[in-house]
Image (cartoon, coloured by chain):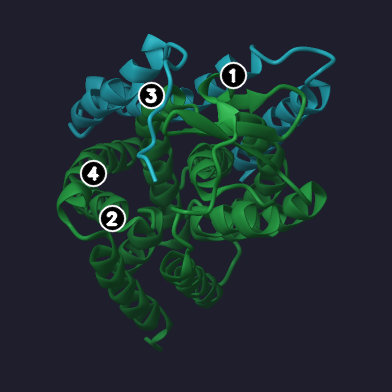
């Protein structure tokens, strides 16, 4: 793979993903595939894009205390098993299967992005602001809103962990973060408010990426200079995407990205 | 509804602010085809992976036994699964 192509695609994917709110890897992996990369290489670059985005988001997230690390570790215990199995399967998976699973993941990301419920007007402030953070010994916590805090507690945890195994499998096979499935999982199945679910997903996706990269990088799926190109492209793209996000109407940007992704999914499935 | 206004949060470890920048600079150097480039590319990759692993370690250090016993065990399990993944990758 040409470094310049990888850097350009990682830049474009991270920028469009951040601006459109659908994640970068789900765009990076199919574009790399369409430029001739093999599945393990495309998945590795996708996971590096995810890891870069998680690293960049960490300082802001820690300051806001939105992410629930206990919840992330619990969900990832299931997801990481799926990721390791999925990434291990990549070397033997026929490309037509890889393309099919990736196209299904893209459609899932688009549907989850377009159908996601708004974050406003759902939660009630019932605690003082000093309650913000995680509750030790439980999958509960509170996030800041105005002058107070909104409490929450994760429900149906065993079911959430089982479903996370499947999400991890998709992540490992496709090289995407699976965040487009994890946030709905935490929100709809585990009853975690969207703000906490989205922030927790960002951290959890970083762990997903590490589990997948642990399999793919030692196996030599990409050369180091290609990995560097992915990190550079994703880093700069993330900054550009954040700047774009402030200028674009969120719903319009999401719809444009959705059309682009559905088109890519169609091209992936088109018989070559 | 009021905008999210985080309270005075915990101090963010300086190293977590530093690592994304290090990854970018090392990544740029890693694009060049020489010995320093290879080391820089490795540094860039390690920096983005290390940032999240370090964040995990720093968080887990604040958890207390026995209150957080289940989550401490889950964190150990997670590290074990990642290690097994690495061993599988090395065998491939």
Which of the chains is green?
A
Distance between the Cα atoms at labels 4 and 2?
13 Å
The residue mark sitting in front, 2 or 3, is 3
Identify the mark nearer the N-term, 4 or 2: 2
Q: Position of residue A109 (x, y in %)?
A: 46, 66
- Position of A239 with respect to A150 (left or right) is left
Distance between the Cα atoms at labels 4 and 1?
26 Å
Bin the neighbour count of mark 3 within 10 Å (Cα to Cα): few under 14, some 14-19, many 20 and up: many
Disc 2 to disc 1: CB gap under 8 Å: no
Identify the mark nearer the N-term, 3 or 4: 3
- Position of A69 with respect to A60 (left or right) is right
Distance between the Cα atoms at labels 3 and 4?
15 Å
Colour for chain B in the figure = cyan
Mark number, residue B59: 1
The residue mark sitting in front, 2 or 1, is 1
Q: Which residue matches tag 4?
A: A242
Q: Which residue matches tag 2?
A: A13
Distance between the Cα atoms at labels 1 and 3?
13 Å
């Amino acid at each position: 793979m040409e470094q310049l192509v990888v850097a350009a695609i990682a830049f474009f994917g991270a920028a469009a993903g951040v601006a459109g709110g659908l994640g970068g890897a789900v765009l990076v992996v199919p574009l790399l595939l369409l430029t001739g990369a093999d599945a393990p290489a495309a998945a590795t670059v996708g996971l590096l894009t995810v890891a870069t985005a998680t690293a960049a988001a960490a300082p802001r997230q820690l300051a806001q205390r939105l992410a629930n690390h206990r919840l992330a570790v619990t969900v990832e215990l299931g997801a990481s098993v799926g990721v390791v199995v999925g990434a291990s399967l990549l070397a033997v998976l026929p490309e037509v299967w890889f393309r099919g699973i990736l196209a299904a993941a893209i459609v899932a990301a688009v549907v989850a992005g377009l159908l996601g419920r708004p974050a406003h007007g759902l939660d009630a402030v019932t605690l003082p602001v000093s309650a913000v953070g995680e509750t030790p010994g439980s999958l509960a916590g509170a996030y800041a809103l105005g002058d107070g805090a909104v409490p929450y507690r994760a429900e149906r945890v065993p079911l959430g962990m089982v479903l996370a195994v499947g999400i991890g499998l998709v992540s490992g096979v496709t090289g995407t973060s699976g965040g487009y499935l994890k946030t709905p999982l935490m929100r709809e199945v585990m009853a975690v408010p969207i703000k906490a679910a989205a922030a927790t997903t960002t951290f959890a996706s970083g762990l997903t990426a590490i589990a997948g990269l642990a399999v793919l990088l030692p196996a030599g799926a990409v050369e180091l200079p290609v990995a560097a190109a992915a990190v550079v492209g994703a880093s700069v793209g993330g900054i550009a995407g954040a700047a774009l996000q402030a200028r674009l109407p969120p719903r319009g940007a999401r719809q444009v990205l959705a059309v682009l992704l559905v088109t890519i999914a169609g091209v992936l499935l088109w018989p070559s | 509804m009021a905008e999210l206004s985080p309270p005075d949060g915990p101090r963010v470890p300086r190293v977590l602010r530093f690592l994304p920048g290090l990854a970018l600079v090392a990544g740029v150097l890693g694009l060049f085809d020489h010995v320093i480039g290879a080391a820089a590319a490795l540094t860039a990759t390690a920096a983005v992976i290390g940032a999240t692993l370090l964040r995990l370690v720093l968080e887990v250090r604040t958890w207390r036994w026995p209150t957080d016993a289940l989550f401490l065990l889950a964190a150990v399990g997670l590290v074990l699964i990642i290690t097994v993944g690495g061993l599988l990758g090395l065998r491939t």
